[in-house]
Amino acid sequence: MESSLTRTLSLNLAVAAACLLLVPAPALAAEDEIKLVIQDHKFQPTELVVPSGKKVKLVIENRDATPEEFESHALNREKVIAGKSTATIFIGPLKPGRYPFVGEYNEKTAQGVIVVQ
Amino acid sequence: MFATAIIVFREILEAALIVGIVAAATRAIPGRTRWLAAGIAAGLLGAGFVALGTERIAELASGVGQELFNAAVLGIAVAMLAWHNLWMSSHGAALAANARSVGGAIRDGRRECSVLMIIVGLAVLREGSETVLFLYGIAASEGGASWPMLIGGLAGIAAGITVGYALYAGLLRIPLRWFFAATGILVLFLAAGMASQAARFLIQADVLPSLANPLWDTSALLPQTSLLGTLMRSLMGYEERPAGMQIVFYVLVLIVIGSGMKWFNSSRPERPRGATS
């Protein structure tokens, strides 16, 4: 009983150590910043152009009182943004193409696309 | 109404499947129902607090607090699922053989039960908080609450719970001989999928590099919004466009927990000698 417990513990520690090793310091490179606004359950602008092969910091301001979830399967991103608040999402580096996104809570009106060139 | 039901269903499904798997995997442990119920209740309470604090959490760590919070919750859940599987690997045979009246097993079972409570509680907390926010958004939208949408939300919750229960009932039909192996594998893939999700949040927060973005694109083959895709996503972490780092996390967790399970299985002191079938 005792030995199996010690074994579990040491294994857990090994997992934790492996996780720590995998986390490098935050990247220092400056990235492009792009702003997006949510108002009346719509995105403004509905089309954003970003450079390819670069990391981009997407800053989304939700001016509505209700929360919204930024979601894009193409970008593999999702994030809940509380009402009257601003959120940050890092995307890229991306290949050229069109990457649609929606506000999941108001999918009919909240639609947009990121164009990577 | 239908769209609302679908959104809520998707949020609820993962938590419901986790509860279903954990409930089935622990059926031989005495008193597990009370622990599971306590876990769900604590998770719901926590979900309310997280929903209330969404803005506060989001502002932490210069705007990526939500990602770090989600990654931490997922990381703890992975560790707990790992503990559960290793515990089952060393006690599963004894439990299956109905040898649960041994004092030591029960004392150990209590620790196992608190681990279960945490796993279930975290799953409900994570998925529940987004559901609470979404339903709050509906209720608070201009013109007040719209009944069809709220009914849709409730239908989504009911559908998610039904699928979770169906999985639970289906698992219980597996013959005891293969039962613990089957639930062990399910839990293993569940943990790997969560590790991959945690990696995605850390990439989104710019804490980890993506390595390859995406590593593959199977959105045409099996869209993750399809019914099968959604189930695969909830059960084993399927994603149509995963980043390379997510696959690194996924495979690493599979290897670490998988080899741990093998080790415990083979080093079990008393192997069931000539077990009667």
Image (spheres, rainbow, N blue to C red):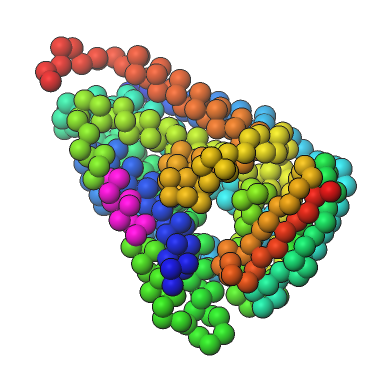
In the rendered image, residue B175, in percent from the top left (x then y), is placed at: 19, 30
Asked which quadrant contains residue A18, the reply is top right
Query: Image height check: is B189 above or below B15?
Result: above
In the rendered image, residue B266, in percent from the top left (x then y), is placed at: 35, 14
Look at 79% across and 45% down and name the residue there.
Answer: A96
Asked whether, in this view, residue B177 is left or right of residue B213, the answer is left
Query: Image height check: is B240 above or below B174?
Result: below
Figure disc tally: 0
Q: Is residue A83 visible?
A: no
- Residue ranking furthest to the left: B276
- Residue ranking furthest to the top: B274
Asked whether, in this view, residue B277 is left or right of residue B20, the answer is left
Give the magenta part as a residue range: B159-168
In the rendered image, residue A65, in percent from the top left (x then y), is placed at: 63, 78
- Please state which of residues B270 and B277 is positioned toward the viewer in this rendering: B277
Asked which quadrant contains residue A35, the reply is bottom right
Look at 30% across and 45% down and name the residue there.
Answer: B167
